[in-house]
Amino acid sequence: MNTILVNLILLILYTYFGYFLAVILLGKLFRKKVLKENIEPHVTLLIAAYNEEKSIAQKIQNSLNLDYPKEKFRIIVVSDASSDATDDIVRSYESHGVELLRVEGRVGKTEARNVAMTQIEGDIIIFSDATTTYQPDVVRKFVRNFADPHVGMVTGQLIYKNAENTQMGIGQVLYWKYETLIKKSQTAMGTLTGSVGCATAFRKSLYTPLPKNIIEDFTGPLMLVLKGFRVVYEEEAICFEETTKKSKQEWDMRVRVIRGGMKGMLHAKKILNPVVYPVPFFQLMSHKILRWLIPVFMVLLFIVNNYLVMTNPEDYIAKILLALQFGFYMTALISYLLEKRGIHLKLAAIPLYFIVLNAASFVALYKTFTSELESTWETNREDQ
């Protein structure tokens, strides 16, 4: 079999399976623990919102019910020039201590948070989204990690709820369980190189303002690692989000997030020095850069495989591999067409999600080098 074909297969297998197994093994070898103690620093929960009138009241109620001393806990909603009833709903909770910080001009979530961070106090800041719900003990689970002076940021465990049992939701749930296992092992290796944007706590003194068109979920942690601090995963800090329901919603979100990640990688490119940052370099190359390149590998694999079959019809291994690729892609296509009709096949969830994820990576890769990433976006919640 052609060497190029074999190498492409090995790259794809390593990216999704080899790295997964390697990071679990390395986590068990390193076993770098986090010093945890029940401490009570001053905490500010910063909720980012733009036209979230449908969810902001529920989010505020959930936040008010969190188990933490009220005199050491502030709830601030930063509204990015919301044009619906979001701000009025937030103001209705002022008597409960909830504060509204409105940023004019529709600057985007990252810049809105940059502005908010210049006006708030607190030892620990928690970034949250308006659609995320927290378990009551989440703040205590976050802050106990900061007893360790080497910890600069803590990210929680996000659990996706797939209430309608859609195939896109099934794919998202399975994918996130896979990602969660990686986060746990990366922490044991020393540090994460990413966070859950809707459930991230960090030391305010370490905050680095970011360019407005960079998504902070990925770049924020890298800036802390560059400063010499650990980013760790706290599996008992549990939060919940609803899954996307349709391929189009997942596609839009993934293109934006992956472009933001690529832009952030360029912003924090110093971390790609394997001599100075060996563990982050290994994680980023395997878990991010190679994964972003998977769609390129897939296209090349299909082309090389076709060429081998056409030039050597007796190569049965090449024929089997090509048939498997056709079968995988056809399953994803059929799944997508059935989804358009409201029919969901659980068995086809993984092929469809895999194709959506990697097609989004391909488009994001192209757009990263051909256009500037916008700092704002419209979230479509109508179909969710």
Image (cartoon, grey):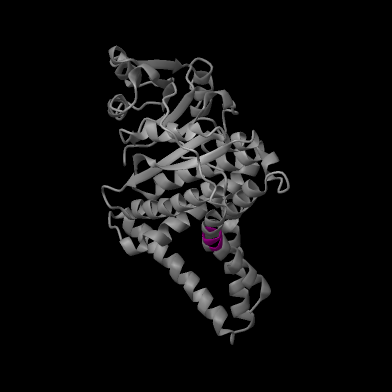
Question: Farthest residue toward the right?
Answer: 275
Q: Which residues are magenta?
A: 18-22
Report x, y in % for residue 52.
35, 27
162 relative position to 144: left or right: left
Question: Farthest residue toward the bottom?
Answer: 314
Vertical comparison of 359 with 109: above or below: below
Q: Front-most of 41 and 95? A: 41
Residue 215 visible, this angle:
no
Placement of the C terminus among the 4 image quadrants: top left
Residue 78 visible, this angle:
yes
Vertical comparison of 361 with 97: above or below: below
Going 28% across and 29% down the picture, which residue do you hit? Answer: 58
Vertical comparison of 345 with 234: above or below: below
Going 36% across and 63% down the picture, which residue do you hit? Answer: 348
Going 49% across and 32% down the picture, which residue do you hit? Answer: 146
Question: Farthest residue toward the top?
Answer: 95
Q: Front-most of 172 and 27? A: 27
Report x, y in % for residue 229.
59, 35
Vertical comparison of 262 with 119: above or below: below
Q: Count how many numbered circles sit on residues in the image.
A: 0
Report x, y in % for residue 15.
56, 59
Report x, y in % for residue 302.
57, 68
308 relative position to 196: left or right: right
Residue 20: say if magenta: yes
Residue 358: say if magenta: no
Going 61% across and 42% down the picture, which residue do you hit? Answer: 368
Placement of the N terminus among the 4 image quadrants: bottom right
Q: Main secondary structure of the magenta part?
A: helix
